[in-house]
Image (cartoon, rainbow, N blue to C red):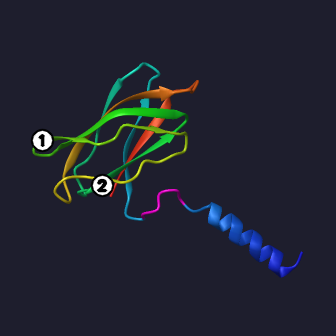
């Protein structure tokens, strides 16, 4: 094969190996499995450090429907976030900003369920 063809193949496979989360400063805070029961409630406890200013959700192993999302800060206050969304398997939400800049988040609560999937979908929660 020519050098040009090999270069194109390496470039294509190299681009496919890039992570789906676009921001290098993001980190996985935790994950949960959503049942198929309507309005399943899950609470993910997360370490406070480092502080975060935005959340993003990623669905794996099935499609999820999110009814409500909230965070509990280290000072005990709860903030309900504007998310009512269906996330396809492998899909992400937009980055959801938290009030007040960088915050100490200790819990992320989700009300939602698995949609159109035999298996329970997993919801991963990222912060940055």
Using the image, tell me which numbered label, if any, was put on residue 77: 1
Q: Residue at x 38, y 29 (%)?
A: 112
Where disc 1 sits, the SS reads: loop
Relative side of 124 to 75, left or right: right
Q: Residue furthest bottom?
A: 3
- Residue 30: x %, y % from top left: 37, 43
Relative side of 107 to 118, left or right: left
* Residue 63 drawn above or below residue 106: above
Where disc 2 sits, the SS reads: strand
Q: Main secondary structure of the magenta part?
A: loop
Circles 1 and 2, Cβ within 8 Å, touching? The answer is no
Q: Quadrant of the N terminus?
A: bottom right
- Residue 57: x %, y % from top left: 41, 45
Q: Label 1 crowding class (10 Å Cα cut-off): few <14, some 14-19, many 20+?
A: few
Relative side of 39 to 74, left or right: right
The answer to whether residue 45 is magenta is no
Q: Residue at x 40, y 20 (%)?
A: 38
Segment tinted magenta in the rendering: 19-23
Q: Residue at x 22, y 50 (%)?
A: 48
Relative side of 56 to 106, left or right: right
In terms of sequence position, does the residue under pointer 1 or pointer 2 come before the other?
2
* Residue 23 drawn above or below residue 49: below
Q: Which residue is mark 2?
A: 54
């Amino acid at each position: 094969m020519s050098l040009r063809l090999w270069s194109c193949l390496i470039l294509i496979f190299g681009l496919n190996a890039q992570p789906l989360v676009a921001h290098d400063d993001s980190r996985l805070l935790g994950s949960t499995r959503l049942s198929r029961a309507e309005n399943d409630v899950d609470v993910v406890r997360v370490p406070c450090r480092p502080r975060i200013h935005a959340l993003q959700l990623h669905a794996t192993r099935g499609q999820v429907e999110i009814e409500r999302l909230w965070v509990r800060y280290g000072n005990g206050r709860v903030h309900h976030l504007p998310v009512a969304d269906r996330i396809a398997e492998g899909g992400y939400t937009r980055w959801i900003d938290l009030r007040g800049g960088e915050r100490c988040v200790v819990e992320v609560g989700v009300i939602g369920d698995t949609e159109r999937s035999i298996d329970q979908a997993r919801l991963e929660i990222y912060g940055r």
